[in-house]
Amino acid sequence: MSRARGGQAVTLALGVCLSLLGACTPRFSVWTLEQSDTRPDGGGTLYIHRSGRTVGPVGEWQEPEVIDLGGAARDLCLAQTGTAPRRPHMVLFDPAHTYGVVAFVVSGHVLFLHASTRTPAACIDVGAQAHAAFPSPDGRYVLVADQNGKRLHRIRTDWAAGEFTLEAAAMLDLAACTTPSGNACEDPLLRPDNAPICPLIESRGRLAFITLRGGGLFVVDVTRTPMAIVGEYDRSRIHPNGCGGVEAVGKMYINSGGGTTTNPWEHDLYALPLAGFTSTPLPPNTPAPVIVYSRDAQGEVDSHGAVLVKGRYLWVFDRAANDVTVVDTRTDTVVRRFLLAGEVSDDPAPDLVDSSPSGDFVFASLRGPKPQSGGHAAIGSTPGVGVLQVMDHGANGRLERVLPIHHVVDGVEQADPHGLRVRVLE
């Protein structure tokens, strides 16, 4: 087996104090997970592209830092859980960006990495599948979506002390529970498949919006023990497979997507008023979600990643249609759609996204020709990190470059980037 790796890191106009303007833009790095195995029992790779000191809209391009998660991280997980982690899928950071939190989608492992040294600090196995692990904005916990286990887990966090504890008493079983209205949480008509996809936490750290593989949504008070449902939606109101969630102007935006054999194509965007939720359980489908737009009638569409740009414009990416829908969150209107496929990449297949601290650039993981997760049609021709220039104060953009990521085995490209997050360095 041979393995060829390539990649370049963008250094933008960051880390440079501009004396004439009296401003200093923070430096950052872009962390991207490449899911293909580095060992027979798993592995995967973390790529870190760092910003630098070159002034200009796009500066130098350098080789990324490459970390084999089949090395020290795997060894720590084996030592602490007895099993090896499989397929790193999502990465996020604690509020101070001192730890990276990696969720492994084939196994149930959540890995905590020292962000500055890249060394593994702790590994916790929550169950069947850790599809996503979201740190709370207040720094008190990490919320984990155990996808095929159909459970929601809470890990208590002390970031300063480096202590992480799985709180078994807090677990919420989404397949076996009963909603506040008395309905079964998982119901063949209301919510046929309660595999949690992404646990989207609002800025106060009290409520989480849990998207479901079969459609529907739960709003959960994650501060209670056990965690408790306070809002319930069925599949007729919120469609399946949402993962792109963003809070803006008092609303939580939730998308729906495709990517499964039972629901290959889907693209909707909903808005839920945060003021409509309290600690008191609400009747089903209350408050009613606002359908910002729907593209379901357009055929092969598959919404996934989303990001707020310049504090106003919500960019919703479609990994099948290869485009971005721009929504003005002040008016909940679609401003435009712009295409990503073109001279830079004929089939980028954008997945997860994040913005630079200044909001002048957006980064997207671009899927490869052989998807390692999902079993869906998010098939791209240029695996790597897409660099998008933000234009018109956030109302428009374009794909400028691709930082390639390769994993070639026996002449076949296996690379499949998925998890991506921007880390602020100063």
Image (cartoon, rainbow, N blue to C red):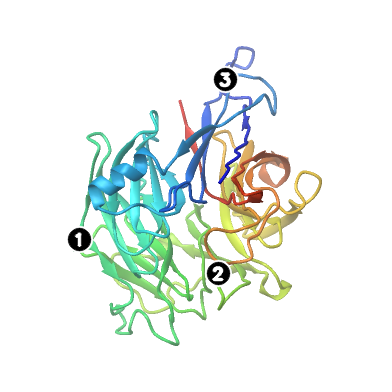
Pick out the residue farthest to the bottom: 189
Residue at horizontal 71 percent and vertical 73 percent from the top: 299
- Badge 2 amino acid: Val
For label 3, the residue is 23
| Among the two numbered marks 1 and 2 on one chain, the one whose residue lies closer to the N terminus | 1
| Residue 297 at x, y percent in the picture | 70, 75
Compared to 206, does 407 lie above or below?
above
Residue 129, percent from left and from top: 37, 62
| Residue 139 visible somewhere in the drawing | no
Which is closer to the viewer, label 1 or label 3?
1
Q: Which residue is tagged 1?
A: 168
Task: Check disc 1 and report its element: helix, strand or loop.
Answer: helix
- Where disc 2 sits, the SS reads strand
Q: Disc 1 to disc 2, how far (Cα)?
A: 35 Å
Name the mark on residue 290.
2
Residue count near mark 3 (Cα–Cα under 10 Å), binned few <14, some 14–19, many ≥20: few
Q: Quadrant of residue 390?
A: top right
Q: Residue at 60% x, 19% y: name it.
A: 53
The amino acid pointed to by label 1 is Ala
